[in-house]
Amino acid sequence: MVERTRTTARASESAGRPAAREQRVTKQRVAVSAALDRLEDFVSTQELHRMLHDEGASVSLATTYRILQSMAEEGLVDVLRSDEGEAVYRRCEATGHHHHLVCRRCGKAVDIEAPAVETWASRVAREHGYTAVEHTVEIFGLCPQCTALAAQERADGQSGGSTEDRGAGEAGS
C-alpha cells in the first residue's frame, strides 16, 4: 500500500529550479533502468535490488538507492511513500505534471491528468498570495480487480461457515 506523499523532479523544474545534472551511464544504471522498464507497478529499492541480484546483475543496495534517487531528481521515475514510509519507485510514462490513482490493496497505479485540480491549486495559491507553488494529489481507492475480489470475500463471509459449523452452533442453543 502507498500513502499520499509524492516527489517528482518535474514539479521542481516548473518552479524554476535548475535541472539535475547529467548522470554517467554505467552498467549498474542501465541494469536499474532496464528492470524498471519491465515493471508496471511501484517497487521499493530493496525489492528492485533483490530482482537485480536474482537476475545476476552486480549492483549493490547502496548503488541502487543512489541511482533511484538520481532518477527521481531527473524526473525519470515517480516516487510514492508506502504505509511504512518507504519510498517506492515506478518508471513514469507521463512526460508532464500528473497525478496517480492508486489501489490501496494491490498498489496498482494509473497516471491521471487533472486540469480541474491544476486550476484549483493555482486559484487557491493566488488568492493567498503564494507563488512558486507545487502540489501533489494522489487518489486512493480499489482497482476494478480488487473491488471484485473484496465483493467476493464479503459474499463468502456472509454465507457463513460450513453446515457442520452452523449445526454445532444450533446444537448448543
Image: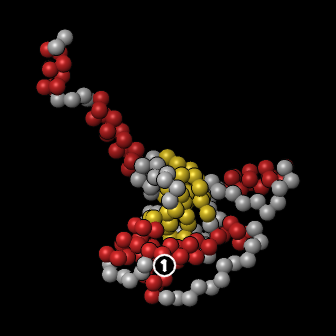
Q: Position of residue 4 (x, y in %)?
A: 57, 52
Q: Is residue 39 visible?
A: no
Q: Position of residue 107 (x, y in %)?
A: 44, 55
Q: In front here: 152 or 18?
A: 18
Q: Is residue 74 visible?
A: yes
Q: Residue at x 84, y 49 (%)?
A: 128
Where residue 16 sits, quadrant-wise, is bottom right
Q: Dot 1: what SS?
A: helix
From the viewer's perspective, tell me whether residue 87 is left or right of residue 148: right
The mark total stands at 1
Quadrant where the C terminus sits is: top left
Where residue 133 sits, quadrant-wise, is bottom right
Q: Position of residue 166 (x, y in %)?
A: 18, 22
For label 1, the crowd category at 10 Å Cα-Cα, with few meaning under 14, some 14 to 19 and many 20 or more, is: some
Q: Residue at x 62, y 54 (%)?
A: 137
Name which residue type carries label 1.
Thr
Q: In front here: 7 or 93?
A: 7
From the viewer's perspective, tell me whether residue 112 is left or right of residue 63: right
Task: Kindly give the residue lying farthest to the right in the view shown.
Answer: 129
Q: Residue at x 49, y 67 (%)?
A: 90
Residue wearing tag 1: 63
In the image, residue 14 sits, relative to residue 162, either above or below, namely below
